[in-house]
Image (cartoon, rainbow, N blue to C red):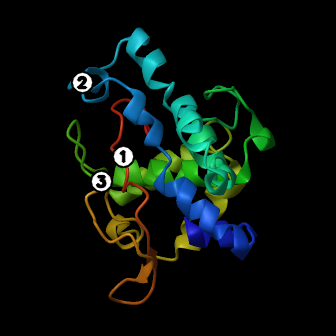
Amino acid sequence: MLDLARTLGINEADMVHIRRGSLLHDIGKIGILDAILHKPGPHSDKEWRIMRRHSEHAVKLLAPFDFLQPALDIPYCHHERWDGTGYPRGLKGEQIPLAARAFAAVDIRDVLSHDRPYRKAWPEERVRTHITALAGTHLDPDIVAILYPTLGCDGNPSRIIPSHRDSDLGQRPDPEGTCYRESVHAMCGRTRGEPGG
């Protein structure tokens, strides 16, 4: 995520906020009942309405801390969609903060590239095809266009973003020294259903 943020021209001084927002992106899920959060099957419409409140819960949890306020764009807005059909506010296009638009692409890639209790990881080519198909609807097409070139990797997702089970929270070169790794799932798990859940 940090390499993508740099490519997008985000100031180095703001990288701490990007990192914090990435790490805390799903912190609001602690306000969701475990019965819904860990449900083994599909969610009902009512359960999805409850689940979608996690973005608002994140703001309530983080906003009281002055040093975290600049990081709120990602936890609050990473489920907004380029076409305006996302949540919690239905923002559209460039109304969505840049950091949240960038994180959404990275998050979807990470979710689909790793095994989940409810499905196996997708092959990299399928992930890339899916993300490309989301350009202009779910994702900012300009970010999709630079996502893979910015990563500059062979497509091995574990070399770019480790799963939430990886305890290495630091940003370090991979063994070949070609990519940087960062954990964006250190705080929370994922939701079943839609990619980027």
Amino acid type for the residue under numbered disc 3: His
The number of discs equals 3
Residue at 22% in and 35% down: 118
Q: Quadrant of the N terminus?
A: bottom right
Residue at numbered disc 3: 114
Residue at numbered disc 1: 188
**Above or below for 108 versus 17:** above
Question: 76 left or right of 125?
Answer: right
Q: Does residue 120 show up?
A: yes
Mark on residue 39? 2
* Image spot of residue 120 (x, y percent): 22, 46
Residue at 65% in and 59% down: 145
Upstream in sequence: badge 3 or badge 2 = 2
Q: Quadrant of the C terminus?
A: top left
**Above or below for 137 versus 123:** above
Mark 1 or 3: in front is: 1
